[in-house]
Image (tube, rainbow, N blue to C red):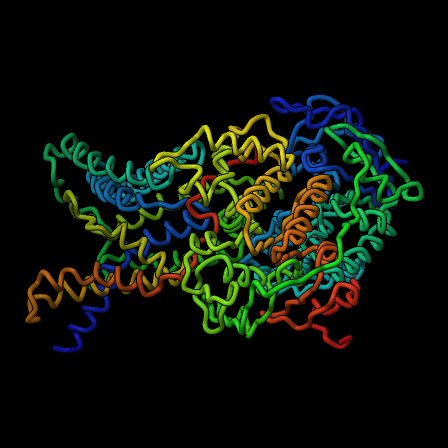
Amino acid sequence: MFFPTLLDFLFRGLEMSAPIAFCALGAVFCEKSGVVNIALEGFLSVTAFTVVWGSIAFQSVWMGLAFAVASGVLMSLMHAVATVTFRVNQIVSGVALNTLAVGVGRFLSQKVFEQETQSAANSYMFPTVLHINSFTFVLIPVVAACWFVLYKTVFGLRLRTVGENPEAADTLGISVNSLRYVGVIMSGVMCGLAAMVLYPSKWVNGMTGGRGYIALAALIFGRWHPVYAVLAALLFGYADTFRIMFESKIPIPSQFVQMLPYVLAIVVLVAVRGKSRAPAADGIPYEKGE
Amino acid sequence: MTLLKMDGITKVFPGVRANDQVTFDLAPGEIHALVGENGAGKTTLMKILYGLYRPDSGTIRLRDQAVAIKNPRDAIARGIGMVHQHFMLVPPFSVLENIILGKESQTAGVLRLEEPAREITEIMNRNGLPVDLTARVEDLPVGLQQRVEILKVLYRGAEVLVFDEPTAVLTPQEVVELFKTFRMMRDQGKGLIFISHKLDEVLDIADRITVIRRGQVVKTLLRAEASKPLIAELMVGKPVFLHVDKPPAAPGAVILEVRGLRQRSPRGHLVLEDLSLEVRAGEIYGLAGVEGNGQSELVRAITEAVRLESGDVLLEEQSILAWDVRTRRDRGIGHIPEDRHRYGLLLPFSLAENLVLGRHHRSPFVRGSVVDFARMRAYARESIEKYDIRTPSELTPAHALSGGNQQKLIVAREMRFDPILLVASQPTRGVDVGATEFIYQQLVEARSRGKAVLLVSADLDEVLSLSDRIGVIFKGRIIREFRQEEATKEQVGLCMTGEKRSA
């Protein structure tokens, strides 16, 4: 049964990769505009809850999507207000939001489902195609759209400018802050989409498993480019799929196999050090000249 | 008709009247130079014109109409363009992208590139500014990057163009080209405001010259009535001697010997290629060259411990390659670094602390292992006096000093440590005439006291007037050496572009 297994691996790998890929695309927008976002993990853990909540509460997968995206936007807005308007250190804001997110999920779950670590089961989901969540395939047009927007539109050119040289943008009458807001909010939207594929049938505390961080690794490995970042996300997603499908069949202690995606992330980051270049103003709060 | 008239402009910052009733006007087809020492208020005035500052009082009129310029967008919309001293470019973007940025052509948000490219090509031809539109800005030499900045301004239809020290980064040949462009723009009826510290250039190109001192206009001169000593005197408020008086050289033993240095950049390009030179005691050796030809790498090889592919650096016949920075300084290498903010000073620290940096751990500044602050302050007061550093006190933080005084501070520190070799990198960059004069005297003084001086400067006039010998560096090697008496500006300038024909 080699071929069915291979096909299964290919499709499941795609499904496993999609949440990482969506998050990485969000990070591309955010960091191209000059704001570092290490809170993707937190965004994702919130949207992973709200998608289940919205779907069950309104008995509609579309409401799940709306909830996920809206909550992602809300989280990202907090990051934007802190880092863009008040110029808080972007790492500190990210850490705070990650910490907040853990509590938010458990708190809401307690309120909505009367249990702290998992939700009720959700059956309002997008249909399955080829044994995987059909929303996975949305990734493909989204990647294309992201590339087009970033490199072929006025908005994309200006967004990238703000991330490279905000002072130059300012002298040309381009608003640095509003573009950075859009960049940060895009990361919230994308984390909402990521939640649609992650595991919308049920929320379990801690289910994100570091995918938000892996997405950052994909971002760097992918040189802050939407297409390459998604390819990098696929690498990590397939590594994870390999682990799930084959860990019981390989004569290596499972703990080691489980490390695979994370070890891979470290190895990849060390390998590309110096070759991958962040936007020049990434992570630096912008203050207008005195 | 006047194109621009700024009338009674006043701008007060806490503690400083940066502009005090300044009046300035510009006619169409005129190049009007604005000169003054650092901190005199030129930049403030231009920032007001460009909408980066709001004046406290005063009016701006464009073509006889009063206008309020609230931000750069307003300025651009009204036909005011600024070529900033620090380029406002996005290095990884193409030339075309950089030019259209903020004034893009679009169809429903999608960029259109062909029509702007055609329009820009036309502007290039009309103004003598050819650049490859598809090149990435980061791959271009500085002179071409400046063209991109000018094209940006012209593409926005500017009628009033402000150039903030545009020649500071250019080779003499590039300056000639730039001035050709200036004249072409002037002939099209545009008004140019030209800010420069280089008085020869001002006299070469300007139609009128306005001198500002301490926030006030001292005088506006017509070209015909201006001369270099007159402008310098108006700027400083007292007569200035720009001429460097040097006793004849009496070179002694070789102090610094650089032998066959080879070094690669992290990207693998050769940045130093078999570079050799010697500097003797009692001699100023000037290194001329377009920036980025290995000057910084050479200076680092002398002053810091860096990895070299091959070659050797000797101080008094001893190899110094294995020495760390402290050892090098202790053995007598003084250094005036090109970037004084990053490498020359601890900006938030006091003047006194900055003055002892590098010797702070040694007597007389420590007793046991405790810093002797009283001694340090006394030493600082002496240095302030002797080196004419203008500061409220020795406890003033370095960042509160003007550029010229910061540089004097560094010169004072390095000179008082009594080095045997002084490496002076861009010692007068961004420094006003008064401080420049002083720094020149100090370099000559070091030479008279038998020190070896290696002078690295992008300012060719400076190199030519101070140096006893001049080496031209090009692509990491010394391609020709001149004695001072045989060096002309034209020859050395040509050599700097890699041209050896005149040899």
Count of numbered labels shown in the rendering:
0
Q: In which quarter of the image is residue B178?
A: bottom right
Q: Give B98 or B244, whichever is nearer the viewer.
A: B244
Q: Which of B363 and B152 is in front in this view?
A: B363
Q: A201 or B385: which is nearer to us? A: B385
Q: Is residue B259 above or below residue B441?
A: below
Q: Position of residue B280 (x, y in %)?
A: 62, 63
| Position in image of residue A218 (x %, y %) | 32, 58
Which quadrant: the N terminus of chain B? top right
Quarter of the figure with the C terminus of chain B: bottom right
> Is B58 situated left or right of A149 in this image?
right
Provide residue B48's location: percent of width, then percent of height.
69, 32
Dividing the picture into quarters, in which one does residue B97 lie?
A: bottom right
Q: Is residue A39 above or below residue B16?
A: below
Residue positioned 53% across, 33% down in the render? B380
B65 shown above or below A24: above
Instruction: Tell me if B98 is positioned left or right of B60 in this view.
Output: left
Mark yes or no: residue B111 visible.
yes
Q: In the rendered image, which quarter is residue B82 located in? A: top right
**Left or right of B129 on screen, residue B231:** right
Q: Position of residue A270 (x, y in %)?
A: 31, 62
- Whether residue B119 appears in this view of the structure is no
Residue at image point 75% right, 29% down: B67
